[in-house]
Amino acid sequence: MKICKNIRSLKIDLNKIQKNKCLSLIPTMGYLHLGHLSLIKKAKKRKEFTVVSIFINPKQFGPEEDLDKYPVNIKHDIEKLTKLKVDLLFIPKKKEIFDYKISSYRYKPLKIENILCGINRPNYFPGVADIIIRLFSIINPDKSYFGEKDFQQYFFVKTLLKKLGFKSKVISSKTIREKSGLAMSSRNQYLSIKEIKIANKLYKFLKLNKKEINDKKNISKSLAKYKNELLNAGFTKIDYLEVRTDDLRKANINSNNKRLFAAVFINETRLIDNIRV
Ligand code: PAF
């Protein structure tokens, strides 16, 4: 696996790729888990030239959020990526990334930034937009892969890139879970053993909530009931528990392609998840 730590060496390597080979990007913030690896495996299986980027993007964190303690383990990440035969790992430096000129792209906030995670994390989507525009301008991938755990992010990136005229096809991949059902996330490692026991209940409650919605045909009552259930089970705060369509519009019981979205806290740790309804 080639490791590029600056844009110049990255571009030299990207120029050597055969013209008919599909170039795929999996952007990450490192501390890789099986969720990330499943995205990479998908690209490798399709015989694409697979680029993984590792960059902890400070702009998508709020002032009270976990930027300073965000987990890092580059050595393990490199071992995992080497095993999967990733073609190229891009680990840019902060200064070079943010000095890179992207002025030709006019990013205007999208409507979907005002719902779900955008409400309590106002820096998040503008920050993600900034880094995505930089990475995609530098690498110009044919395809990119995002996990469905962060469904709003996947849909945001897809919409943003299309609006700005990037050619990249944005592909989503299903959430990878622990045996307990807990969606894999780099942030799970913040949880104590006691907190993990609570976190493990989230997926179970989402499935029960889904069943109740489908049985009783009443979304708002079922959501109210399960917000209470979550708080009684030890979750300390609920940012949202909502049903929306696959394109993040408000859903009613008759809407097609519904998803149940949750963002909850256990003390300081914020967890998100979603399932099809
Ligand atoms: O999902 C993430 O890890 C990040 O938000 C991303 C897409 C790499 C942008 O920094």
Image: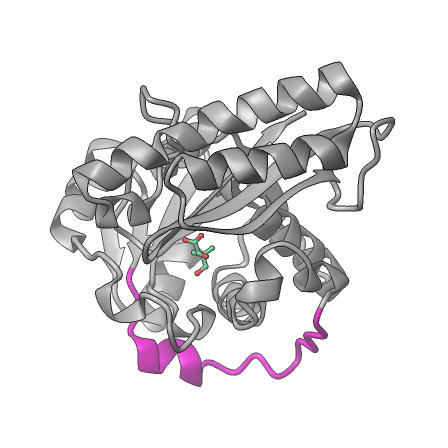
- Where is residue 182 shown, x and y percent of the image? 37, 30
Residue 241, quarter of the rendered image: top right
Q: Residue at x 32, y 77 (%)?
A: 94
User: Splitting the image into four quadrants, where does ligand 1 fall?
Assistant: bottom left
Position of residue 67 relative to residue 265, above or below, is below
Of the pair 232 and 192, the residue shown nearer to us: 232
Of the pair 9 and 106, the residue shown nearer to us: 106
Can residue 166 be seen here? The reply is no
In the picture as drawn, the residue positioned furthest to the top comes out as 215
Can residue 11 be seen here? The reply is yes
Position of residue 64 relative to residue 117, above or below, is below
| Magenta highlight on residue 101 | yes
In the picture as drawn, the residue positioned furthest to the left comes out as 75
Q: Which residues are magenta?
A: 91-109
Of the pair 39 and 83, the residue shown nearer to us: 39
In the picture as drawn, the residue positioned furthest to the right comes out as 254
Q: Residue at x 52, y 63 (%)?
A: 132
Q: Quadrant of the C terminus?
A: top right
| Magenta highlight on residue 88 | no
Q: Residue at x 40, y 50 (%)?
A: 236
- Where is residue 15 shown, x and y percent of the image? 43, 58
- Where is residue 89 shown, x and y percent of the image? 29, 52
